[in-house]
């Protein structure tokens, strides 16, 4: 059974850093497109980043230069390192497995990141 | 442009057919994917590619595309279809993704 379990969210002050983890089971992270999508409270979905099976990474303009997507093949885990956090980064962050880029067939339950002083 | 535009809200009578649309320049080059999201839950993929449904998605959900517009059609809407629906596609770069603003579907 495919499962994605995010962790690492919490309350962080503006300018701070946080690393989200997404532990996968039932499939191999390194063989798939994997992405992060976020949703601010009461708002719509916003694509954040993707890592291809070959290792290429891409980011939304809103996070480029501040966020880094990566994976640990030995742990079958996806990460999102978030630096220089801003209030507008407050959201539920979902990790997802993509069948095709943009077509995410499995999602985690989400982890809430709150950036506030 | 890398934006996708959706109507904020649509309503349909129980058992009737409803079409939810998504407009954007990227849709001339890339297919849209469609997601259903109910309150407090993660999104669920309902349509991807030309018109593909993941396992477990009822066949009353279908997708189509013409020019810069993608459509999600629900034929015979059920009460459980009441939800927010989002489209997305690759953007003009081909490597990033953009989401539409979402459509809140009410089943009357």
Image: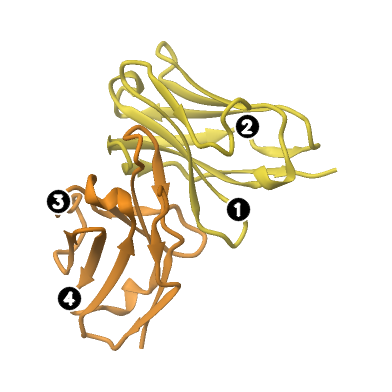
Give the CA distance from mark 2 to mark 1.
Answer: 17 Å
Q: Give the number of the mark in front: 3 or 2.
A: 3
Q: Is residue A110 left or right of residue A103?
A: right
Residue denoted by label 4: B75
Do callouts 3 and 1 point to residues on the same chain?
no
From the top left corner, tell me how far across and down residue A92 is, in percent: 58, 47
Q: What secondary structure is found at the residue carrying circle 1? A: loop
What chain letter is assigned to the residue under label 4? B
Mark 1, chain letter? A
The reply to whether residue A67 is visible in this rendering is yes
Q: Colour of chain B?
A: orange
Q: CA distance from mark 3 to mark 2?
A: 36 Å
Q: Is residue A31 above or below residue A93?
A: above
Q: Secondary structure at mark 3?
A: loop
Give the labeled residue for mark 1. A40
Identify the residue at image location x=43%, y=23%. Answer: A57
Circle nearer the viewer, 4 or 3: 3
Q: Earlier in the sequence, mark 2 or mark 1?
A: 2
Q: Crowdedness of circle 1 by 10 Å Cα count: few (<14), some, many (20+)?
A: some
Inter-mark Cα distance, 1 to 4? 31 Å
Residue drawn at point x = 40 percent, y = 19 percent: A76
Q: Quadrant of residue B76?
A: bottom left
> Would you place residue B35 above or below residue B98 in this image?
below
Residue for badge 3 = B50
**Front-most of A98 and B41?**
A98
Q: Which chain's residue wears label 3?
A: B
């Amino acid at each position: 059974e495919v499962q994605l379990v995010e962790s690492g969210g919490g309350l962080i002050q503006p300018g701070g850093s946080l690393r989200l983890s997404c532990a996968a089971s039932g499939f191999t992270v390194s063989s798939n497109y994997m992405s992060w999508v976020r949703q601010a409270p009461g708002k719509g979905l916003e694509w954040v980043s993707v890592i291809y099976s070959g290792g290429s990474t891409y980011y939304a303009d809103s996070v480029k230069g501040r966020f880094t997507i990566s994976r640990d093949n030995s742990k079958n885990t996806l990460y999102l390192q978030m630096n220089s956090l801003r209030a507008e980064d407050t959201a539920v962050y979902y990790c997802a497995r993509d069948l095709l880029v943009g077509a995410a067939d499995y999602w985690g339950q989400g982890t809430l990141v709150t950036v506030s002083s | 442009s890398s934006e996708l535009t959706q109507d904020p809200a649509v309503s349909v009578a129980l058992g009737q057919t409803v079409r939810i649309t998504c407009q954007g320049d990227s849709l001339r080059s890339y297919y849209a994917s469609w997601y259903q999201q109910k309150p407090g839950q993660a999104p669920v993929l309902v349509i991807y590619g030309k018109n593909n449904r993941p396992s477990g998605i009822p066949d009353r959900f279908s997708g189509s595309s013409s020019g810069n517009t993608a459509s999600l059609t629900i034929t015979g809407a059920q009460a459980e279809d009441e939800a927010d629906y989002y489209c997305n596609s690759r953007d003009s770069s081909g490597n990033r993704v953009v989401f539409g603003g979402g459509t809140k579907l009410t089943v009357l």
